[in-house]
Amino acid sequence: MIVLDNVTINQLRAFVAVCDQGSFSGAARKLSRAQSAISHAIKALESAFDVELFDRDTRKAQLTAAGRSLLPDARAVISRTEEMKTRAGSIARAGAPQLSVAVDVYFPRAQLIEGLRTLQAEFPTAAINLRITTMQGGERLVLEKLCALAVTVQDVPEVSPDAVERHWLCEAEMLTLCAPSHPLASTPNPIPVDEFGRHVQIVVTDNQPQAEKTQQGVAGKRLWLVNDLGAKRDLLKAGLGWGHMPRHLVDEDLARGELVELERRAWHLGPLTFVISQRRGYDLSPCESRLVELLGNP
């Protein structure tokens, strides 16, 4: 008979950590606990489940058939517990509206400002914490609970799909550009991808430690990587390379002739899609819901 009354979340966390880290010592480091505590937690789980979770005859933490079968359930229980904690925190909130949001640097700044202006008029006492981020930076702040929401580019890999959920927000048109002095500006349009690949491409990448590097619309291997969209725009205008930019950021440059749009041959570049990232189980406050509505309706 399996008795689950004494199974704890910490025991399940120890089980999952051993599986993820590949050893009891690695799990101890991951959870900042003594290795003996990890061993005790696993033994308690095995006693409660009346099965062996790991094969003791191997040097590595090798799962038994029972362990492999129970691992997805352990992950699911931990995930639902985190959702419950997040929901309880939402319910407990009180006082003046608090809004903490991370916004990707690619998001239209005028659209953001107009949304915040309207929000300020409707919630004059709201305390707003705004972070401008790049790539995975926003979702990392959400995961670390430093921000409740993040405006994220959809094509950026998710930091933690089990803990963070995404909802469609809006789109922005993307253009391929270079300076009038750049060789591509005098190349007959439309330009094949091989020709783009022969020239330096300016690409924005993530500057977060251990972040999965995301490079969208890359044509070749001659890349200059920057972690600031303004720097990319300046390098493009200086004729140092070509690249993709949101239309809303370069309309004035195009009008002044400081940048020119390039037509691509047989190379589709879709619009930049933005999503709202939030922790699973998180209930938006009226202030937060209104901001999402405003940002999604320019």
Image (cartoon, grey):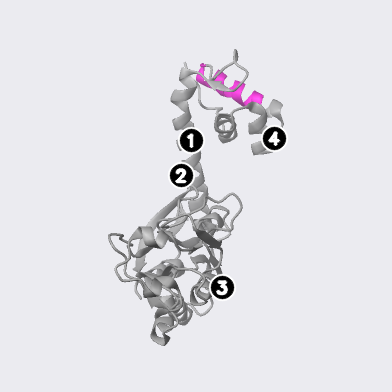
Distance between the alpha carbons at the discs numbered 4 and 2: 24 Å
Q: Are marks 1 and 2 in contact (CB under 8 Å)?
A: yes
Callout 2 secondary element: loop
Residue linked to disc 4: 33
Residue linked to disc 2: 162
Quadrant the C terminus occupies: bottom left
Secondary structure, magenta segment, majority class:
helix
Does label 2 or label 3 sit earlier along the sequence?
3
Residue linked to disc 3: 127
Residue linked to disc 1: 75
Q: How many marks?
A: 4
Does label 1 or label 3 sit earlier along the sequence?
1
Could one spot residue 275 in this view of the protein? Answer: no
Does label 1 or label 2 sit earlier along the sequence?
1
Figure quadrant of residue 246: bottom left
Could one spot residue 222 in this view of the protein? Answer: yes
Where is 185 relative to 274, above or below?
below
